[in-house]
Image (cartoon, helix red, strand yellow):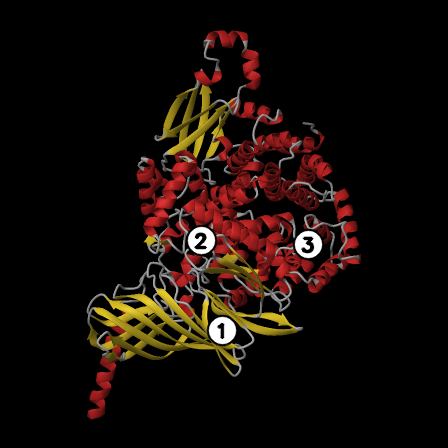
Amino acid sequence: MNREIRGGGLFRRKMELKQSVEQFKGQTRLPKLAIPTSYDLYLKLDLTACTFSGTVQVNLNILEHTKYLVLNALELDVHKVWFTKSNFETYQPCDVVLDGDDEILVLVFDEILSPGDGVLGIDFSGALNQQLKGLYRCTYVDGGVKKNMAVTQFQAVDARRCFPCWDEPALKATFKITIDVPSELTALSNMPITDEKLNENIKTVYFEESPIMSTYLVAVVVGVFDHIEETTADGTKVRVYCPVGKCDNGKFALDVAVKALDIFTRYFSTPYPLPKLDMVAVPEFSDAAMENYGLITYRENVLLYDDLLSPADRKQFLTITVSHEVAHQWFGNLVTMEWWSHLWLNEGFATWVSYMATDIMFPEWKIWTQFLLKTNDGLRMDALEQSHPIEVEVHHARSIEEIFDSISYKKGSAVIRMLQGYLGDGTFQKSLSSYIKRYAGKNAKTDDLWGVLSENSGVELNSMMDAWSKKKGFPVISVKYKDNILEFEQSQFLSSGLGGDGLWIVPITLSIGSYNKCKTFLLETKSGKVDISELVHSPHENSSSVNEKNKEKCDDHFWVKVNTEQSGFYRVNYEAKLAARLKKAIERNCLSAPDKFGILDDTYALCEACKQPLSSLLSLMDVYRKELDFIVLSKLINVCYKVMEIASDAIPAVVNELKQFFIDLLLFSAEKSGWQSISGESHLNELLRGEVFLALATFGHNKTHKEAIQRFQSLLNDRNTHLLSADTRKAAYIAVMLNASTTDKNGFESLLKLYREADTVQEKELVLRCLASCPDPKILLEVLNFMLSDEVRDQDSIYVLFMISSEGREVAWRWLKENWDLIFAKYGAMLTYYCITKILPLFCSNEKADEIEAFFASRMHPSFTMILKQSIEQIRLKARWVANIRREQSLEDLVKQLPFMKC
């Protein structure tokens, strides 16, 4: 009888516990029962067993009477928990529940905890995982022997994998960290070391207590490094930690970081908040870089730069990336978004201001012109029905990973750039300084930023900016001209060609026949008209006299360019006669590089949306034959790639003629640049050479292939040859792989040998990026399997997917289906993202979209739900475009004539 009663009581208790825990499941955010104010974290690493253990003591403020404390924990074992009130009363929970689905730790107490301060203590342990998140292990080579080291990557929600915590950006606290590590290793964290104690072969390292910060910014790195350092004018010590013997390759990054700290200190009128800044090259890392407060981590191939072996685009990417991460020390770390819905406040601003800093350091790079590539990526994604607003609702921890995308980074930064242009540089800078000062050490929402900008500018921005930040999409501005009146009409632009119902307040800029004749205004309604008489005619002439005396001259030189210098985040659709005049202006080289870029980009987007025929796009492309500006050629080449991809399905009978046309478009610039770099030539010329010869190789230009393979052979004979520069190696490697086949694998095997013998991570990355370009299905399959082998580091596997061609898409898709479970289990979101975005959109049929949907129906996961829907939408958009192209009359005849046309 007694046993039955006890058994019944135990059952009831379990049911009560289940019900009590159930209330915390399925919630987007933690319940507001308590907030942390400081963490005292001790970690002990065992790099042989690849495990760790630790104790965290959290100073808490209990906000209400409660029997529960709920915080985050994932893949941890909890051994002991206690809670001590300020009166030294100690409580131990009666139940400790770890919920892996919701990634929470629920502590249930018999006694009610009353509001006030206390300390929560937890002993815990875990495994050093290999998924490059949380506290993970990676390897380095020491004297030819692989050894383990430990690194953290907590953004967005993986601090909980290292220690139990309130893992939300708004729940800021201070952190005091202590680590036990093998004595021969270097231990780094956010703050400087205060003390070290040696106990035989174990070293205990104590770090200063940090200022208040979010959990995702906490960082620890343990390994073997060399380092170099400088001190800024303000006394901040800046160090770059490199693999042993590679310090020379860290000098450029160190110089950029020191300059960036000075630039941002002045621009934000706020000093760098910490006493030191460390930057570490990590051998295995999931992202390009991570802005941990005072301890920025990078992939080795991002942070290290070799003057002789690194291409020009690597130098530029390094500068922008270091500037981006240093900018985060203010925008993101000092002032942090309140919740992940406002991620763009971190990433959009850091992207925009990194270009500003790069422009200050290297004005000759014309980096703001290259910023258009960022804007373009944002426009392309935001034209999808499966896009999302800049401010996006986040309902599951793992779905946060999906919003680190082109909307948060690229649309976000482009909207900021547009707003800066509207308000003016001085007002904008003053406003940002005020914003940083007001919210330093705090969290902010998008409306907080608009509020400060409105105060400083006198412009009410909330109503203007709501459509840009709270709604997805952007407008296309249709433009007509009649009798000195320009008519404007806005509508949402969608790549599907469907109409949307969005309405934006759009800062319109325009130039009339000259950049000396400009006008700006706000288009606040669906449509509007602007009288441009004073810009078309001289003040002393009336329109009738001008029309009679100078009509021919006006017709020849009159043009209207809307969105001058591409400063706005919108597209423009000109009526036919305005488009024709802009085409003439391009031929006469009357337009700036950004405007030539924009006209081609908008025309391509309208063509893709089936709003203009492909023949119009090809006709426009023909006037770019003599183009030598890097950014314009880069856009031209990109459009060539995209058109070739769709033409292979839509008009396969004339693909060879189309390739020849594209080759002809690029031969002028190729002849001007040549294969050999020239001493003292500009950075932009170096970039141009690499892009042009890569495109010619991709399109199968025989002369380029022959030259590339000869120069590749010179490289195999002499790794230090000057005949194949860093900027043209990719073109040569692509040529080699395009000529490789199952019957002649020499080139492929030579590239693999080059990969295995390469002593720089940059060279290994470059080879990996080229291998999958081979059209031979058996070699492609071999490459994809090689990607998953032990010869390729997990972080580097993504590079293999970048150059798969439409010819290889079926092989890649079959391989992906066969290996999906392995890929998802071993690599997680890091590789699945690229598998989805680099393989699936290669298809162009609704049937294939249906097949892909069916395959993933039982395999959905929050970490890739949105990108999968976007990729399937892209397939259906391309299927629609293919059908539209097939309906174009006389298109094939036109394409056959293209190689014989002369500009």
Secondary structure category for the residue under label 1: loop
Label 1 to label 2: alpha-carbon separation: 27 Å
First reached walking from the N terminus: tag 3 or tag 2 = 3
The answer to whether residue 78 of the structure is visible from this angle is yes
305 vs 750, left or right, is: left
Secondary structure category for the residue under label 2: helix
Disc sitting over residue 328 in the figure? 2
Q: Residues within 10 Å of mark 2 (few under 14, many from 20)?
A: many
The answer to whether residue 890 of the structure is visible from this angle is no
For badge 1, the amino acid type reads: Leu
Relative height, residue 862 to residue 790 (above, below): above
Secondary structure category for the residue under label 3: loop
5 vs 432, left or right, is: left
For badge 3, the amino acid type reads: Leu
Q: Residues within 10 Å of mark 3 (few under 14, many from 20)?
A: some
The quadrant in which the N terminus is found is: bottom left
Label 3 to label 2: alpha-carbon separation: 29 Å
> Mark 1 — residue?
128
Q: In this view of the protein, which residue sits in the foreground, 381 or 284?
A: 284
Q: Disc 1 or disc 2, which is closer to the eye? A: 2
Label 1 to label 3: alpha-carbon separation: 34 Å
Q: Position of residue 71 (x, y in %)?
A: 32, 68
For badge 2, the amino acid type reads: His
Q: Position of residue 182 (x, y in %)?
A: 53, 77
